[in-house]
Amino acid sequence: MKIIDVYRRQRPVISCEFFPPKTEQGTASLWRAVETLKAYQPAFVSVTYGAMGSTRTQTVALVRRMKHDFGIEAMAHVSCVGASQAELTELLADLQICGIENVLALGGDPPQDQAAVARAVQAFQHANELAAYIKTLQHFCIGGACYPEGHSAAPSKEVDLFYCKKKVEDGVEFLITQLFFDNQDYFDFVKRAQAVGIDVPIVPGIMPITNFTQVKRFTHICGAKIPLQVEHDLTPIEEDLPQIEAYGIAYATAQCRELLEAGAPGLHFYTLNKSRATAEILTHLGFV
C-alpha cells in the first residue's frame, strides 16, 4: 500500500519512526515498542538509515518484519550520502523484493571525518536528485523531509523552501517535518509552502521530550529551537527524568491537539524506539 493513498482517503494519519538498534537489549526494546504502538493502529511506520548506509541491511530487515510479521505498512529511509547509484539500485531492489512500496528520500549527513569521501563516491548530491531517480523506477511512493525552521545548512528559509519545492517537483509525494516545539513554526511553514505551490501533505514530526539533555543535543544538531518557556520550565528539573517525561507528554499532547484542530494531515512520532510517551499521547488524544 502506498502511503500517499492513505493521506488521500483518511485524516488524521498516525505514523511512528524507529531506528536500527545496536545491541540485543536495544532490539528487544524496539520490538516491545512496535508491539505496544501497533495497538494504536498507526497507518505506517518508518525506519531510519544510518550514516553512509551503515544500517542498510538492518533497515531492510526491519521494514520487512514490520510489514509482514506485524502487519503494519512500512517505509524505509534512503540516503544518498556516500552511496553510488549501483548501491542505491541494489538497496531499492532489495526493498522491492520485500514488498516495500514506500521510501523517504533524504540527502543525509556524512560523518564529519568522511565528508570528502562521501562527496567523491555518491551518485546524488541532494535529496531531490535521489527522489527523481527513485521515481524512474515506477515502484515506490516517495516521501521527503522538510524543515519548518529552515535547514541548518541553508543560507535562508527562502533558499530552503526553494529546494523543498524542487523535491516535490522531482517526485516527493508527501513531506514530514523535522522536529519542532513551537506550532507557529509549522503553521508559518505550511503557509509559505502553499504560497509557492507546494500542494502535498505536510506532516508534523513530533518528538516528545523525555530527556531534556538529549533533546537539547538533538535541537543543536538539526537547528530547531526550544521555546524559552519550555527551557525555563525544564532547566530546574533537568535531572528528574520522571518529571521531565510527564511534562513532555503533557506538552506534546497539547501540541498535537492544536495541530490536528488546525487541519494537520497527521502526526509522525519520533519514538526513539520507545513506546510509553507516544502511547500516552495517543491515548490522551483518543486514539485507542
Image (cartoon, rainbow, N blue to C red):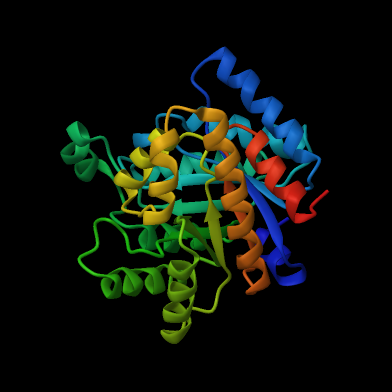
In the rendered image, residue 94, in percent from the top left (x then y), is placed at: 57, 38
Query: Residue at 45% across / 34% down in the picture?
Result: 237
Looking at the image, residue 162 lies above or below residue 276: below
Q: Nearer the viewer, residue 132 or 210?
A: 210
Toward the viewer: 146 or 181? 181
Q: Is residue 211 left or right of residue 242?
A: left
- Is residue 102 in view? no
Q: Quadrant of the N terminus?
A: bottom right
Q: Is residue 170 visible?
A: yes
User: Looking at the rendering, which quadrant does residue 141 occupy?
Assistant: bottom right
In the foreground, 151 or 4 = 151
Q: Residue at 46% across / 38% down in the picture?
A: 49
Which residue is rendered at x = 69% and y = 66% of the image? Answer: 7
Q: Name above or below for residue 30 compared with residue 165.
A: above
**Residue 278 screen position, x and y as percent:** 65, 42
The x and y percentages for residue 255 are 58, 59
Q: Residue furthest top?
A: 24
